[in-house]
Image (cartoon, grey):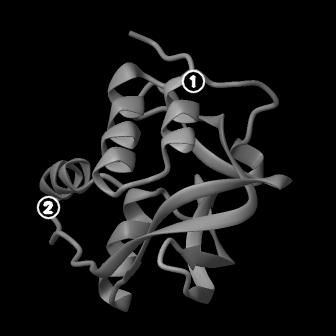
């Protein structure tokens, strides 16, 4: 989740900006990044994760209060658009973390085809991948996704 994008969303929705602590890069194994969800707000494809035994997804793991999780859940469209799932991740420093909450598109919202993300949205993902030191092979994979101009 991009912090500037979250701040803008909170301003539009008159809510406090959630506070994240102990944020660090992590890898979610046996899942792939997919754009099989269409965001009506963004009018483009949006990120989703799908089970895939041979792949992995990089992201950030953070501590967050229950009150702040409620705000993040609202932003992510829980439960109508995204659902919460519990996963195990490994930080890039090597620590394993169990029962981590992440969001996955609700099954009823998943499409059978690729939903092209906007250039703006894909650039948010790329900027955060670079900022947080995701591996170059993963950044190259992100760069390879087609996008709407």
**Residue receiving disc 2:** 14
Check the image and report above or below for 140 versus 102.
above
Residue 22's x, y, as percent?
31, 84
**Residue receiving disc 1:** 145
Determine whether, in the image, residue 80 is placed left or right of residue 17: right
Instruction: Determine if residue 14 is in view.
Output: yes
Residue at position x 32%, y 26% from top?
A: 120
Check the image and report above or below for 49 versus 39.
below
Element type at mark 2: loop
**Earlier-in-chain disc, 2 versus 1:** 2
Residue at position x 33%, y 76% from top?
A: 23
Residue at position x 65%, y 66% from top?
A: 28
**The image quarter in which residue 16 lies:** bottom left
Residue 148's x, y, as percent?
45, 13
Residue 129's x, y, as percent?
39, 48
Residue at position x 34%, y 45% from top?
A: 130
Residue 32's x, y, as percent?
71, 49
- Quadrant that contains the C terminus: top left
């Amino acid at each position: 989740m991009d912090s500037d994008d979250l701040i803008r969303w909170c301003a539009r929705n008159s809510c406090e900006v959630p506070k994240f602590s102990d944020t660090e890069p992590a890898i979610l194994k046996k899942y792939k990044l997919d754009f099989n969800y269409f965001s009506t707000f963004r009018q483009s494809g949006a990120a989703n994760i799908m089970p895939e035994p041979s792949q992995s997804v990089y992201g950030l793991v953070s501590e967050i209060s229950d009150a702040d999780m409620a705000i993040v859940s609202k932003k992510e469209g829980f439960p109508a658009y995204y659902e919460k799932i519990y996963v195990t991740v490994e930080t890039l420093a090597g620590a394993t973390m169990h029962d981590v909450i992440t969001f996955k598109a609700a099954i009823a919202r998943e499409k059978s085809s690729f939903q092209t993300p906007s250039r703006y949205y894909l650039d948010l993902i790329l900027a955060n991948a670079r900022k947080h030191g995701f591996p170059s092979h993963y950044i190259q994979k992100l760069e390879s996704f087609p996008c709407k101009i």
